[in-house]
């Protein structure tokens, strides 16, 4: 059995917020696979069943985001699951809205739900499916941004991503995290980004640019973008194009 955890906050007031992308993903999985969240145990709403023939347990912690790890630990103990049996689906500020990345282990990026899970399990090596929600233009807007409602176009982008998210999850269930990441991430793309130093800056007129510093020390600036989201999307597309050229 695999435990699929979606992160979010309970209550209708949070139902359509950016921070609840993990809950939205689990609700989609439940609907597509004819499962119901008809039981509560270990401080989580759960749905048991199968996805693509694989036995799974969907769980939405009911502890609020900052204490998500309590529910995850209790469920793991109850069903005698290992860290390799866990997949956590969550929102991610570092990805553009409508984009997805798969990884195993690593840091939390300041995500309170992930931090709680790592603290409770004393282990960060579980699989994650990261659903992009983009960043606000200013860092001091972070808390209000993630708890604000998705704009209609953001909701649409996220909903359009969910079928791909399900296919990626099936790939994890069928094979493993690395296989799914290779298929759905474009690992060369992420590696290429890491090989270059990319910085985002804003000019005196408020326009956004990004600057690429390559391994040979040369720099090149790209812009101008009216919003930070547009700039982030351009960086993503640049990396994607680079990855495609590397495959040729």
Image: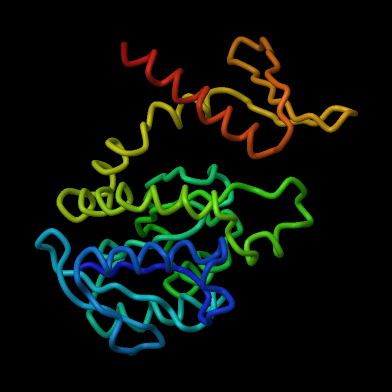
The quarter of the picture where residue 32 lies is bottom left
Judged from this view, the residue extending furthest toward the front is 152
Instruction: Determine the residue positioned at 31% across, 47% down.
Output: 164
Q: Position of residue 140 (x, y in %)?
A: 79, 56
Q: Position of residue 188 (x, y in %)?
A: 39, 26
Instruction: Determine the residue positioned at 64% across, 20% down.
Output: 212
The quarter of the picture where residue 166 lies is bottom left
Judged from this view, the residue extending furthest toward the left is 53
Q: Position of residue 33 (x, y in %)?
A: 20, 66
| 72 in relation to 98, above or below | below
Q: Position of residue 99 (x, y in %)?
A: 46, 43
Q: Is residue 111 left or right of residue 43?
A: right
| 199 in relation to 112, above or below | above
The quadrant in which the N terminus is found is: bottom left
The quadrant in which the C terminus is found is: top left
| 99 in relation to 152, above or below | above
Instruction: Determine the residue positioned at 73% across, 23% down.
Output: 224
Instruction: Determine the residue positioned at 21% across, 48% down.
Output: 171
């Amino acid at each position: 059995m695999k435990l699929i955890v979606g992160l979010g906050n309970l209550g209708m007031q949070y139902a359509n917020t950016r921070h609840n992308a993990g809950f939205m993903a689990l609700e989609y999985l439940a609907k597509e696979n004819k499962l119901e969240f008809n039981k509560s145990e270990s401080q989580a709403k759960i749905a048991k069943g199968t996805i693509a023939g694989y036995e799974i347990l969907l769980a939405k912690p009911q502890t609020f985001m900052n204490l998500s790890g309590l529910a995850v630990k209790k469920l793991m103990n109850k069903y005698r699951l290992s860290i390799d049996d866990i997949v956590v689906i969550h929102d991610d500020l570092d990805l553009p809205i409508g984009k997805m990345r798969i990884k195993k282990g690593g840091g939390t990026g300041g995500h309170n739900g992930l931090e709680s899970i790592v603290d409770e399990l004393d282990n960060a090596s579980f699989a994650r499916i990261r659903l992009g929600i983009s960043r606000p233009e200013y860092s001091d807007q972070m808390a209000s941004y993630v708890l604000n409602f998705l704009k209609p176009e953001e909701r649409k982008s996220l909903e359009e991503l969910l079928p791909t998210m399900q296919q990626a999850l099936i790939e994890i269930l069928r094979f493993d995290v690395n296989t799914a990441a290779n298929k759905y991430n474009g690992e060369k793309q992420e590696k290429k980004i890491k090989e270059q130093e990319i910085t985002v800056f804003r000019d005196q007129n408020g326009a956004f640019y990004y600057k690429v510093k390559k391994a040979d020390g040369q720099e090149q600036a790209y812009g101008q973008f009216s919003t930070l989201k547009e700039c982030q999307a351009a960086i993503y597309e640049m990396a994607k194009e680079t990855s495609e050229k590397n495959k040729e």
